[in-house]
Image (cartoon, rainbow, N blue to C red):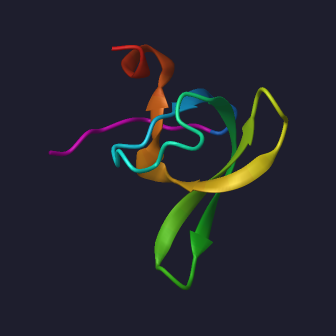
Amino acid sequence: MTDTVKLSIGGTYIFAPDNPRKTKNRGRRCTILSFEFDQNTNQVEVRIVYHDTNRQTSVEISDLKPIDEAAD
């Protein structure tokens, strides 16, 4: 299954990973700060800031969902 989502810097999204074991930050709202290339894994990661704590972290692109889609 392939989902297409347009992510943009400054956009607001929900952290909602498809992996059921990733429960720690599930459902938290965040804003994208930047996109970063990880040379160790050869993947692009997303730098985000959570709205509730203002903490920054990097997450996988597939873990972010638009707010309207996450509510379904």
In the rendered image, residue 52, in percent from the top left (x then y), is placed at 78, 27
In the rendered image, residue 19, in percent from the top left (x then y), is placed at 35, 49
Magenta segment includes 2 = yes
In the rendered image, residue 26, in percent from the top left (x then y), is placed at 53, 35
Q: How would you classify the magenta stretch by its main secondary structure?
A: loop
The residue closer to the viewer here, 13 or 8, is: 13
Q: What's drawn in magenta, residue-wise?
A: 1-8
In the depicted structure, whether residue 50 falls above or below residue 71:
below
Q: How many marks can you see?
A: 0
In the depicted structure, whether residue 23 falls above or below residue 59:
above
In the depicted structure, whether residue 28 falls above or below residue 64:
above
15 with respect to 12 (left or right)? left
Residue sticking out furthest to the bottom = 40
Residue drawn at 46 percent across, 35 percent down: 16
Residue drawn at 43 percent across, 14 percent down: 68
The answer to which image quadrant residue 58 occupies is bottom right
In the rendered image, residue 29, in percent from the top left (x then y), is placed at 64, 27
The answer to which image quadrant residue 6 occupies is top left
20 with respect to 28 (left or right)? left
Quadrant including the N terminus:
top left
Residue drawn at 67 percent across, 32 percent down: 30
Residue sticking out furthest to the left = 1
Quadrant including the C terminus:
top left
Residue drawn at 34 percent across, 43 percent down: 18
